[in-house]
Image (cartoon, rainbow, N blue to C red):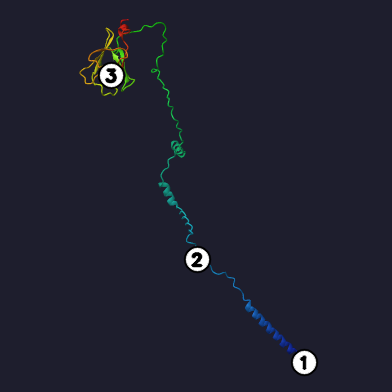
Amino acid sequence: MTIEGETTAGHEAKAAKAHKFLGSLRDALMAAGRDDAPIDMTPPPKPASAAKPGADEKAPPPLPPKPQSLSAEEAARLARTAPELKPLVPEAIAAAKDADVPPTTRVVRAESRVKKIELEPEEAPARTVLVRGRQQIERGVFERDPVVGFLIVVGGPGLGSYRPIFEGNNTVGRSKENRIPLDFGDDAISNEAQAYLRYDSSDRSFLFVPNLAKTNVVSVNDKRPAGPVPLQPMDVITFGRTQVAFLPFCGSEFDWSEISEA
């Protein structure tokens, strides 16, 4: 009996130890479960400002609407009312091609200063004729009054100019109406006939006659004549502020009458 009692008591003692051990293990697991709680891995929600596009960002443009398909009746009506297209003619095609081609820059060359004068056949100068032997010179009537001498300006306005002296009487003055006009700008010369210059072919002499009715006085070789004065080659005559030298062409050695009589 004693053995049975001991055995029973031993079993109970073992059961109590086992229960105590299980209780301690359960408590430890529960304590560990509180520390090792599962972690929520759900990501936090994004803020509202990040979801909306920024003010600077532009929204994409809307897509164009799709063309509506025409019905068979509408297509037939448009085909009937459409204007008739004329075929392109070659001229229109060429004009279109010319319009597409950019204009070509034209090169402008300076014209030569010396231009060749092209003469027409009828305007071409006559060919020079070769003269052989002695030719007969024709002397007919004078086409204008023959020149018998010259007055050459050696002082005052018109320096270097000259005026011809004709056969017969010659009036000398500032106006162009005079036969010998000294129109070089000297207003001290009388306008009409301040003096007379005469060539007489009968005796082949020159005579200077002052016009005493004029206010301005003339002089010959710095002398103021009161009447006619015979002129000699290179005599200097003063009219106002102008001096002219006398240069004869006709005289004792030549006269136009010799040519007309020959």
Q: CA distance from mark 1 to mark 2?
A: 80 Å
Instruction: Specify which label sits upstream in the sequence, 3 or 2.
Output: 2
The amino acid on which the numbered mark 2 sits, given as a three-letter code, is: Ser
**What residue is pinned by disc 3?**
238
Q: Position of residue 136 (x, y in %)?
A: 36, 6
Secondary structure found at label 3: strand
Q: Earlier in the sequence, mark 1 or mark 2?
A: 1
Q: Secondary structure at mark 1?
A: helix
Q: CA distance from mark 3 to mark 1?
A: 193 Å
The three-letter amino acid code for the residue at tag 3 is Thr
Q: Is residue 168 visible?
A: no
Number of marks drawn: 3
Q: Amino acid at mark 1?
A: Glu
Residue under the image location 50 percent in, 65 percent down: 49
The numbered dot on residue 6 is: 1
Q: According to the image, label 2 marks what residue?
A: 49
Q: Residue at x 45, y 51 (%)?
A: 72
Q: Nearer the viewer, residue 259 or 1?
A: 259
